[in-house]
Image (tube, rainbow, N blue to C red):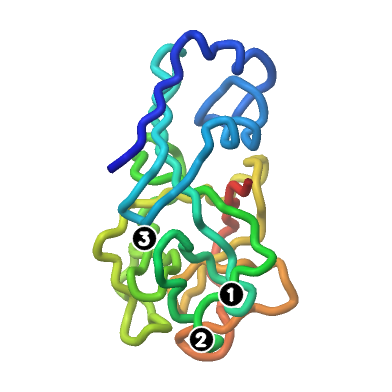
Amino acid sequence: MAFNKNIQNKDAKFFRFGKFDSVFNGGQTRRKFLKYMMLTGIGVTGTTVTLSLWHKPGFTQVSRQGDWQWCRKCQALSFVGNDSLGACPAGGVHNHRGSGEYVLILDSPNVRGQDNWRWCNKCQVLAFAGNQTLGICAAGGVHNHQGSGNYVLKLNEPNYPGQKEWRWCIKCQELNFAGNDSLGSCPAGGVHNNISSGAYTLEIL
């Protein structure tokens, strides 16, 4: 069941200063806005926050989901809102120690970006589902995206606020962080291969 928070005119004082990105076009910083909305995510098919900003012209409805974190072992982005942390190709389950909380745009077709990113219900990672191959999964076989929503990522937008250096692996289809010395273990063997990837930017709280 989704939790919808409608911002009414009584909240207009929040939007007095500064600018958001092209999604919001008004208000304070994105970080303050997301904290103001108390973003949470319970399960990939569970709670999300929908921002209904119809009282301001030019606003679109945007759903965002929290509870995404970086795994320090395999460098992939994975969902932490379920009972299982998911199998990690580096062994055991994902280790999110040291990670911030990432917030992804979910089921918002009017938002500019690359869609068809999906959650794998076996290993909990975010993987691209727009190619013929679904990618090797650390839990065995290929990724299974049944039950996933459609996530939109910001691609090749250098001025978009957030954490840079996220890349797509051509072997396993997973999103992984390429800003560390380690390229991370790939479930398809060896380390991630990001040679064909564009540059993704993720929102982080």
Neighbor class of circle 3 (other Cα within 10 Å; few <14, some 14-19, many 20+) is many
97 shown above or below 1: below
- Identified at 41% across, 69% down, the residue is 124
- Identified at 54% across, 70% down, the residue is 76
**Tags 1 and 2 in contact by the CB under 8 Å rule?**
yes
Residue type highlighted by circle 2: Gly
* Dot in front, 1 or 3: 1
88 shown above or below 197: below
Q: CA distance from mark 1 to mark 2?
A: 9 Å
Q: Would you name the residue on which mark 2 appears?
A: 92
Residue type highlighted by circle 1: Asn
Q: Position of residue 94 (x, y in %)?
A: 53, 76
Q: Would you name the residue on which mark 3 appears?
A: 118
Q: How many circles with numbers are drawn on the protein?
A: 3
Q: Would you name the residue on which mark 1 appears?
A: 95
Neighbor class of circle 1 (other Cα within 10 Å; few <14, some 14-19, many 20+) is some
